[in-house]
């Protein structure tokens, strides 16, 4: 199976409860409608019969970036990158989910490399 959402969710909640989430000292208030709406649209989107075929046929370079210490499991991102013919998985060592707050320089480098790959493909 490509994505086992229950396993992902269980791992995320276990990590959130034991490790917590490093926000780099930033405090923000999230829109309470974002997660429920995102989850609803994701559940609808993921059920499309041809989804994996469409992803596997994408001709463009794509870079998927994770932090090595993200409390969310990285295996779905690794699988997605592997499924794409021009997919690339990048993991930023020591970074949590809020990589842009704690590892901005490393993220900037990874994004610049991703943009360069897209430009080369044009």
Image (cartoon, rainbow, N blue to C red):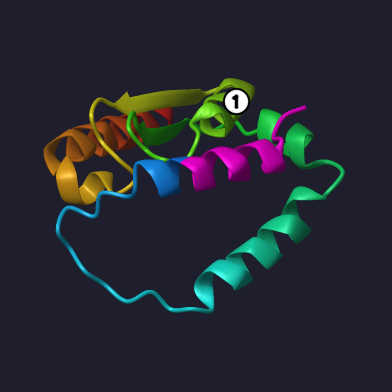
Q: Viewed as shown, does residue 84 lie left or right of 47?
A: left
User: Of 70 and 2, which appears nearest the observer?
Assistant: 70
Q: Position of residue 97 (x, y in %)?
A: 34, 45
Quarter in which the N terminus is drawn? top right
Looking at the image, residue 19 lies above or below residue 90: below
Which residue is under mark 1? 79
Residue drawn at the location 60% of the way across and 25% of the way down: 79
Looking at the image, residue 89 lies above or below residue 9: above
Q: Position of residue 9 (x, y in %)?
A: 61, 45
Q: Viewed as shown, does residue 18 lie left or right of 77?
A: left
Residue drawn at the location 17% of the way across and 33% of the way down: 106
Is residue 27 found inside the magenta-colored segment of the image? no
Q: Quadrant of residue 27?
A: bottom left
Q: Which secondary structure lies at badge 1?
A: helix
Residue drawn at the location 87% of the way across and 44% of the way down: 49
Region rendered in magenta:
1-14
User: Of 94 and 80, which appears nearest the observer?
Assistant: 94
Quarter in which the C terminus is drawn? top left
Q: Position of residue 3 (x, y in %)?
A: 69, 35
Q: Quadrant of residue 117?
A: top left
Residue drawn at the location 23% of the way across and 29% of the way down: 94
Q: Is residue 57 visible?
A: no
What secondary structure is the stretch in magenta mostly built from?
Answer: helix
Q: Is residue 14 visible?
A: yes
Is residue 6 found inside the magenta-colored segment of the image? yes
Q: Quadrant of residue 88?
A: top left
Q: Viewed as shown, does residue 45 lie left or right of 63?
A: right
User: Of 105 and 103, which appears nearest the observer?
Assistant: 103
């Amino acid at each position: 199976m490509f994505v086992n959402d229950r396993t992902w969710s269980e791992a995320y909640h276990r990590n959130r409860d034991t490790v917590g989430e490093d926000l780099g000292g930033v405090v923000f208030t999230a829109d309470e409608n974002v997660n429920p709406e995102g989850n609803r649209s994701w559940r609808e989107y993921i059920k499309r019969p041809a989804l994996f075929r469409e992803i596997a046929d994408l001709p463009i370079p794509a870079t998927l970036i994770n932090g090595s210490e993200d409390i969310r499991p990285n295996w779905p991102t690794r699988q997605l990158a592997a499924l794409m013919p021009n997919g690339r998985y990048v993991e930023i060592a020591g970074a949590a989910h809020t990589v842009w707050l704690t590892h901005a320089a490393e993220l900037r480098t990874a994004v610049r490399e991703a943009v360069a790959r897209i430009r080369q493909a044009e």
